Amino acid sequence: MAILVDSADTDEVRRALELGFVAGVTTNPTLIAKVKRPGLEVLDDLLRMTEGPVFYQVTAETLSGREAQAREAAAKAPGRVVIKIPATTENLALAARLGREGIRCAITAVSSAAQAYTAAMAGADYAIPYVNRLTRQLGDGIAVVRDCAAVVRNSQTKILAASLKTPEEVVAAILAGAEDVTLPLDVLLAMGEHELSHRAIADFAASLR
Ligand code: E4P
């Protein structure tokens, strides 16, 4: 069970890690493009900032290119860099090959339980469904998480729920069986807040006056 921060922005990541309960960092090509820096340089910084896992996605157009990217990134901190590989049959085979060599892999952009099941059969460490995107595209991202969690239950593959936009969506994903979640900083900070808690704090303060 773990919360990760979904960001390639080192200021955001620092803020998240300072909370003391964030286990690691996930990135994706869009998040890295936003910070306008070379991906491997960002990866180096993130690895220095946390002792936990840092997820890094391969993007090359060819399979051999993605494999080379995976090896280069994984070599930066063996066992701690988790290579994100988008779900396709060809990429599942890549994950199986890398996994046999001890490179940790996450099958990402998982859109069906069939993909999560094959990720488990390929020995991936994680299958990552994009909950909010799936809700927008298919109608019910939480149902996809539930099915994914059910089909990987007897494997070593964890469901890491991503694309989560509110604390309520995070909780729904966990209740549906996601073991880990990755959250943007705003959602992460919102997790520990509730209007009624603030009201209770104010009431206690008033009773001391
Ligand atoms: C997961 O690791 C992805 O980086 C991310 O959560 C996707 O979220 P989005 O749908 O907000 O882009």
Image (tube, rainbow, N blue to C red):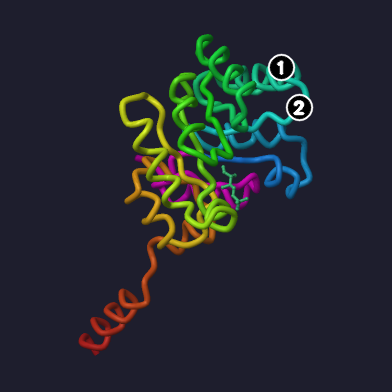
Dot 2 or dot 1, earlier in sequence: 2
The answer to if 11 sits in the magenta stretch is yes
Residue 115 can be seen in this image = yes
Residue 96 disc label: none
The part of the image, by quadrant, that contains residue 1 is top left
Left or right of 180: which side holds 47? right
- Picture coordinates of residue 103, whole percent (x, y): 54, 17
Within 10 angstroms of label 2, few (less than 14), some, or many (20 or more) residues? few
Q: Which of the pair 194/64 is nearer the observer?
A: 64
Residue drawn where x is 54% and y is 47% of the image: 130
Q: Which of the pair 14/161 is nearer the observer?
A: 161
The part of the image, by quadrant, that contains residue 3 is top left
Q: Which residue is mark 1?
A: 68
Closer to viewer: mark 2 or mark 1: 2
Amino acid type of disc 2? Ala
Within 10 angstroms of label 1, few (less than 14), some, or many (20 or more) residues? some
| Gap in angstroms between the C-alphas marked 2 and 1 | 9 Å
Amino acid type of disc 1? Ala
Residue drawn where x is 62% and y is 51% of the image: 11
Residue drawn where x is 34% and y is 44% of the image: 177
Magenta residue span: 1-24
Seen in the picture, residue 88 relative to 9 is either above or below; the reply is above
- Picture coordinates of residue 91, whole percent (x, y): 62, 23
Tell me whether circle 2 and circle 1 mark residues in contact (CB < 8 Å): yes
Residue drawn where x is 47% and y is 62% of the image: 166
- What is the residue that sits farthest to the left in this orientation? 207
